[in-house]
Amino acid sequence: MASARGARNAAIWGTGLLQDTQKQVLGELGQGYDAAQGYLGQAGDLYKGMTAAGQPGLDKYNALTLGSGADIQNALQGNAGYQFNMDQGLQALQRSRAAGGMLASGNTDTDTLAFAQGLAGQQLAAERAALNPYLGMYTGGVQGQAGVLGQQAGTATDYYTSRANTLDDTTKNIVGLGSQALLAGDQAKSQNQANMINIGTGLLKGATSLFTGGLGGIGGGFTGLGK
């Protein structure tokens, strides 16, 4: 039974060691995961700042591109430079027509409309071009946030996969130690039974020999009496 007891003690010791190691490994994995998520969270906040800074530019660009004619006109009229150029241009056009005696002609209205449309088109193109840096900032922020979310998901997947593998390996090793202890116990039990059988067989043989020898001596005595 000594070997069976030793196997059980070894299994208990090994199980404790495996559990302690598992706890340490899981703790280090958790620390690494938390640290990675923290750094990724900081990166995500920076990208959110980029998105927030670019949002007004995107809103204005959408208004100048997707809005109605009235929305676009309102956006342009809110630009002091555009309004100044419009006023100056119209005044110059009126002075030119007045000097030529054509102020009340239909051509004046046509020229005024053409000038206003041309200036609005130029200003609109300039406004859109000026918004490009904001659009780039907004797009970069959104892409950065998407990338961070992907990295966070990958980190979480790796962490929980490693955690599951650690738990699985520890369980398998503990089961293996228990199986070895049980096997050693069965082997020791079988060996002890074999030893008992061998001892019993030896005692039986010894008793048989003594009994046979005793009978032989008694038989010899009877033979002597007969003579």
Image (cartoon, rainbow, N blue to C red):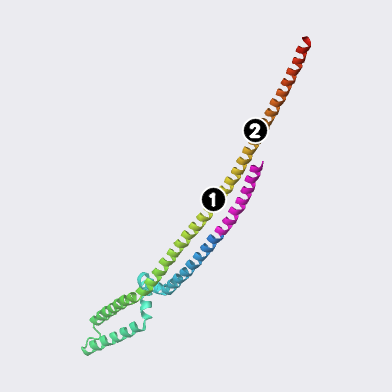
Q: How far across and how far down the image is residue 209, in percent?
A: 70, 23
Magenta span contains residue 140:
no
* Residue at figure coordinates x 61%, y 41% from the top left: 184
Residue nearer the viewer, 41 or 169? 169
Q: CA distance from mark 1 to mark 2?
A: 37 Å
Q: Which residue is mark 2?
A: 194
Magenta span contains residue 23:
yes
Q: Is residue 27 left or right of residue 62?
A: right
Q: Quadrant of residue 100?
A: bottom left
Quadrant into which the C terminus falls: top right
For mark 2, give the secondary structure. Answer: helix
Image label count: 2
Q: Which residues are magenta?
A: 1-26
Alpha-carbon neighbours of circle 1 within 10 Å: few (<14), some, or many (≥20)? Answer: some
Q: Work out which residue is located at the far bottom of the displayed protein and give it.
A: 99
* Above or below for 164 versus 78: above
Q: Work out which residue is located at the far left of the displayed protein and give it.
A: 100
